[in-house]
Amino acid sequence: MLGDENGEMSTIPGLNQIQFEGFCGFMDRGLTEELYKFPKIEDTEQEIEFQLFVETYQLVEPLIKERDAVYESLTYSSELYVSAGLIWKTSKDMQEQTIFIGNIPLMNSLGTSIVNGIYRIVINQILQSPGIYYRSELDHNGISVYTGTIISDWGGRLELEIDRKARIWARVSRKQKISILVLSSAMGSNLREILENVCYPEIFLSFLTDKEKKKIGSKENAILEFYQQFSCVGGDPVFSESLCKELQKKFFQQRCELGRIGRRNMNQRLNLNIPQNNTFLLPRDILAAADRLIGMKFGMGTLDDMNHLKNKRIRSVADLLQDQFGLALVRLENVVRGTICGAIRHKLILTPQNLVTLTPLTTTYESFFGLHPLSQVLDRTNPLTQIVHGRKLSYLGPGVLIGRTANFRIRDVHPSHYGHICPIDMSEGINVGLIGSLVIHGRIGHWGSLESPFYKIFERSKKEQMLYLSRSRDEYYMVAAGHSLALN
């Protein structure tokens, strides 16, 4: 609740603004970002190349009105057109056409989408922010065990653990643990580079047994050892380029992608200066995380509260729609590859238009709005319930939690919720504490954090300045209740 010096309430913002901003973010940035990721596609003989010219994409005005879409059980959507080129490398000829890729459902004036005549709304999802978190737990002997958990952008985890003898182990997806030396060597670092880039080289050297020396004797040995543990395969696998590519794809690219937010959090937590565009986990990250874990073992540094809002981020409507658009483009890429190969085999005439079908994009969004747990039928009991429904925050959904397995600590009201998430308006039953509501003046910040407005008070003057602060920033200020100005 906000007030000025006379005790008057400030203007209530547009309560559907969180939905509109998310959809506008997708149309302004997300659409273009995913289109730029679409690769150039070649046939097996590398004689023909297909590519999209992203700069020329167009979204056409809807062919029907919102009311007609409801009455006729249709989808209120816009057609997406993109220029595509087909290049014959031998003759250097190019054929360019503007092609119809598919339909993208639009947002109406209520902040909802009309899909097959039904008003559907996309709920914002709250999840663990990617980065590294340090915790301490008691083992069965009552001894504190310190762990560092690296969370990727999609939710995968890599755990670092330090035992009684100050040896550091890594565990991928809760599988069998391997030494930190093997992991760093498999990522491309040799022993000399490891020892030069850590603060406690003597601890790493004490871990270096004869057996360990053999495992990290070369990058190939380390990759074989890591692949054997990571993939849980028996026998003695033989090093090959295909094995290296498989490990690179399954672990170092998919499971270790931090994203922009994760890279920012890693740099801040570990005092690194790695460029923001480097969104994958690096050997330097692993070694800095191990150094910090050793410091935690010896009482230096602070542990993290994973349930604190500063360690959470919001997967907004923009992120969800962009993910689905990216998925549709991957499916479109597979269709184009298959069509090119089939057309060449049967000696058919190729054009950009007959290579592309609108099925991947259209069916992907229909499946998302119809089946995804974060896409729900709008509660139209009354105008107030419609507004409340659009401001829900959910811990549920793919990559986060399941209502039946979520523990009490996650469901409980955390002190950091004050001023950001309403502690009263939440779901009941099996999902109690997992679905909440954003406060009236709250909004989603640039980095996916929840922000609330605060008046900044100056000691020597009566002027005020209103700031939007996230939980990672407002903890450095002395905060008073919203009606304090009215009482003075």
Image: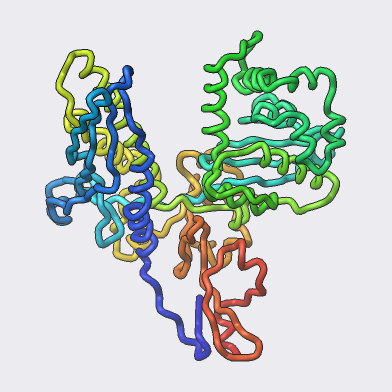
Q: Is residue 213 above or below residue 60?
A: above
Residue 409 visible, this angle = no
Above or below, 50 relative to 37 = above
Q: Quadrant of the C terminus?
A: bottom right
Residue 337 left/right relative to 175: left
> Total of numbered circles in the picture?
0
The image shows residue 21, relative to residue 131, as above or below, that is below
Q: How is the image coloured?
A: rainbow
Q: In this orientation, which residue lies closer to the viewer: 394 or 191?
A: 191
Q: Residue at x 45, y 82 (%)?
A: 9
Residue 2 in view, yes or no: yes
Residue at x 54% of width, y 39% of height: 257
Give me the residue at 26% from left, 36% from top. 363
| x, y percent for residue 270 | 69, 49
Picture coordinates of residue 278, whole percent (x, y) = 55, 44
**Residue 458 as seen in the image, left or right of residue 141:** left
**Nearer-the-camera pick, 270 or 441:** 270
Residue at the front extreme?
Answer: 91
- Residue 89 versus residue 488: which sits nearer the camera? 89
Tell which of 452 and 196 is nearer to you.
196
Q: In the rendered view, would you say 383 is above or below 263? A: below
Q: Position of residue 435 (x, y in %)?
A: 48, 52
Quadrant assignment, res 13: bottom left
Q: Position of residue 450 (x, y in %)?
A: 51, 60
